[in-house]
Image: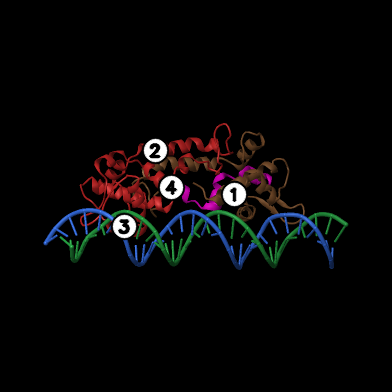
Chain colours: A red, B brown, C blue, D green
DNA sequence: TATATTTAAGACAAAATTATCTTAATAAGC
DNA sequence: GCTTATTAAGATAATTTTGTCTTAAATATA
């Protein structure tokens, strides 16, 4: 469903957000340790997400990554996935046709349209804050 | 969502099935022409699907590919996807955790469980026959 | 049996993704 | 300013996926 880069980005964002809820900034090594993702690769993914302004990155001593209060409230799963994998999963044809819609559908179009809409809606209505609070409360896990 | 190999396999199967409904056997060149897929690569994918007994392949003059009447009735989208991409899309965790379930969920588990079930159900209840009849009736397209 | 036609299989190549390493840029604290 | 800690960026490498090519195997027909 998602690329490895996207899985790592989502895990990292959820972890960083869970620390930001607590006012803590985290280093890339902490992120890798607590998400089980390769450190250097995750750093590149976070760099991409930072350019998309989905989190803050601060260089130097006491630096690291964090989400500000606006980002905590507004960043959605869909934003993270779009920034890394693009919007093919939401918008694209299951069979890869360039144009596929109700007028000119691929053979699977009608079977997928509802599920794709549900997926899109879920990703656009779930914020990183929603996921991070569940992690803080111990209701979910990111590793092992 | 699907790999290229899987997209090609699905398109090829739908095309071959649409011809089988008409009692026609088709050659790999015809399949490539009518699905817009790379011929040699599609041939390898069909070879995989043939080993999984999802279609018939006949060598030699007047040979080609076809679905027998049992295959037309019973082969489902889920069977084709599983044979090519495996069942990670149906069964796997969105964040790639090895174990992820209601007891030990990843932060996105509950958000995905319904959508994944819907997807699985759709793929397991839609047969290649269903898709091929729509194509034959001109209600859908495979190319362009 | 010989020939032509077709898929099968495996070697090879190209491209994309995943992963790592090195150097640069930035900023805190002395 | 100097040193240290941190992310940024780019080079490089490894792996996987996608794609092609060549040869083998199978089969219909003469």
Where is mark 2, residue-wise? A122
Q: Tag 2 or tag 3, which sits nearer the N-term? A: 3
Name the residue rendered at 24%, 49% in the picture.
A19
Whole-number angstrom distance, CA of label 1 to CA of label 3 = 37 Å
Q: Mark 3 vs mark 2: give the one in front.
A: 3
Q: Secondary structure at mark 4?
A: helix
Q: From where the camera sits, is residue B106 visible?
A: no
Q: Which corner quadrant of the image does residue D5 belong to? A: bottom left
Where is mark 1, residue-wise? B9
Would you say residue B86 sits in the magenta stretch? yes
Q: Which mark is residue B57?
A: none
Whole-number angstrom distance, CA of label 2 to CA of label 4 = 17 Å
Same chain for the residues under marks 1 and 4 in the image? no
Would you say residue B32 sits in the magenta stretch? no
* Dot 4: chain letter: A
The answer to whether B118 appears left or right of A37 in the picture is right
Q: Which mark is residue A32?
A: 3
* Dot 3: chain letter: A
Q: Mark 3 vs mark 4: give the one in front.
A: 4
Image coords of residue A42 (percent x, y): 35, 55
Q: Main secondary structure of the magenta part?
A: helix
In the foreground, A79 or C28: C28
* Stretch of the chain drawn in magenta: B68-92
């Amino acid at each position: 469903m998602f690329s490895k880069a996207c899985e790592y980005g989502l895990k990292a964002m959820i972890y960083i957000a869970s620390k930001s809820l607590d006012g803590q900034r985290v280093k890339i090594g902490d992120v890798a340790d607590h998400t089980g993702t390769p450190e250097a690769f995750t750093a590149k993914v976070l760099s991409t997400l930072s350019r998309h302004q989905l989190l803050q990155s601060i260089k130097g001593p006491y630096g690291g990554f964090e989400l500000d209060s606006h980002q905590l409230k507004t960043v959605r799963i869909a934003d993270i996935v779009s920034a890394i994998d693009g919007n093919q999963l939401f918008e694209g044809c299951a069979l890869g046709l360039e144009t596929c819609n109700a007028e000119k559908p691929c053979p699977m179009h009608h079977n997928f349209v509802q599920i794709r809409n549900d997926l899109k809606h879920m990703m656009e209505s779930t914020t990183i804050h929603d996921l991070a609070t569940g992690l803080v409360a111990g209701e979910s896990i990111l590793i092992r």
